[in-house]
Image (cartoon, helix red, strand yellow):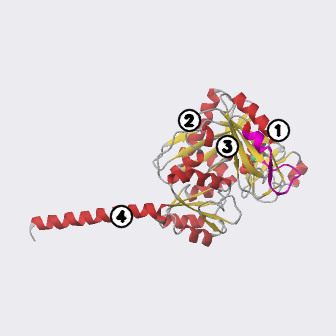
Amino acid sequence: MTKNRLHAIVCKGSFFVFFCRERYNKKDMNTHKNTLGILGGGQLGRMMVEAASPLNLKIKILDPNPEAPCANMEVDFVVGDFNDEETVYAWGQDCERITIEIEHVNIAALKRLRDEGTVVYPQPEILEMIQDKGLQKQFYATHDIATSDFEVVENAQDDSRIAVPCVQKLRTGGYDGKGVAVLQTAQDKENAMPGPSVLEPLVDIEKEIAVIVARDEQGNIETYDPVEMIFDPVANLVTRLAAPANITQKQSAQATELATALMQKLEMVGILAVELFLTKDGQLMVNEVAPRAHNSGHHTIEACVTSQFEQLVRCVMGLPLGQTRLKEPAVMLNLLGEPGHTGVAQYIGMHEALALPGVSVHLYNKKDTKPMRKMGHVTIVAPTIEAAHANADAVEKVLKVVG
Ligand code: ADP
């Protein structure tokens, strides 16, 4: 064979490989290979689907509830248990990339899918660690991340060096204040929730702050401005959020630095909501993290250049990070089911609320309301945070969810 002929064959071969790869990429764009899988079809999934829509991504969701907020959206909605290994594994077969909207999902299945070539973000090992509040606290302690003192115990009744008053947190399964209890007296400790727990001294909290950090596959990081979370003391869940937080510039920089350091140490891809305590004596410490879109970032839809939901989609799909700049101050109100009301949800005062300036209402497509159930949220943007709070007060007065 002449040298020229050999050269021609090699060139043709290269062209063939190039041609096949191009065809494959085009196929990727039009078939399941472009599918983003989301474990969980609740309100966070719903807002992710809305954010993914302009990017024309195909979405496949797994949720046990056939009436979940994502159920009637234009997605491949599969009803099934995201805690069951075989269900998650089978569901994930035709996804190119997978993420979560809830961290309490089956990790073994995610590891199998990842080992077989599916891209899974956040990484399953990080989800596994974050699922357990004991391991989370140990991670902070060993990686020099400021956090409260703590002890991991088999049972809160056990002897421990953390004296009452203290806070008990079940290591697994808690959310939105459930699985967390303040133990004021020795008697409370005797009657504490059973099960492996973390005990923490009661921190003297001035403010609760959250910072959302995004990290892409290359390790680039973007952070959103710190926000302030205002809690309902009885239900122990966030009722109002202010962006930016009413803290000093130095505190804001410190909170951002702490959240960034944590994300760098985790080396996680995706978005991480870092919840922090600002103590009465001015210290900042990490309380806990959520490795996903979070209630403390809902305002980003209207108030920031890139919403937390779009940012997560970008991270998971290997796309560049978007800008996080706060365009305008914002207040976010969680729209909770009225106490004393249960049944098919009805929304009172929608007309009056939407007539106020800068108001955007997001309803989560939940059929039934119950006391303090998160049924939606409202974001109020304004030229100043004071004006946003004033309009938020007005919204709070008129907009109610009753059953
Ligand atoms: P969850 O995962 O249910 O959100 P958290 O750990 O965030 O649980 O605790 C819920 C709330 O309980 C916090 O936002 C805070 O108001 C309060 N809390 C938690 N830990 C402490 C603590 N060590 N001291 C005082 N209050 C705490």
Kindly identify which residue carries mark 2: 325
Q: Is residue 240 at all visible to an observer of this figure?
A: no
Cα distance between the residues tagged 3 and 4: 42 Å
Kindly identify which residue carries mark 1: 397
Q: Residues within 10 Å of mark 3 (few under 14, many from 20)?
A: many
What residue span does the magenta drawing correspond to? Answer: 336-354
Mark 2 belongs to which amino acid?
Arg
Q: Secondary structure at mark 4?
A: helix
Do the residues bearing badges 4 and 1 touch, measured as CB atoms within 8 Å? no
Asked whether 163 or 226 is in front, the reply is: 226
Kindly identify which residue carries mark 3: 296
Give the number of the mark in front: 1 or 2.
Answer: 1
Mark 1 belongs to which amino acid?
Lys
The residue under the point 60% across, 31% down is 253
Dot 3 or dot 4, earlier in sequence? 4
Kindly identify which residue carries mark 4: 23
Which percent across, then down, holds residue 21?
A: 34, 63
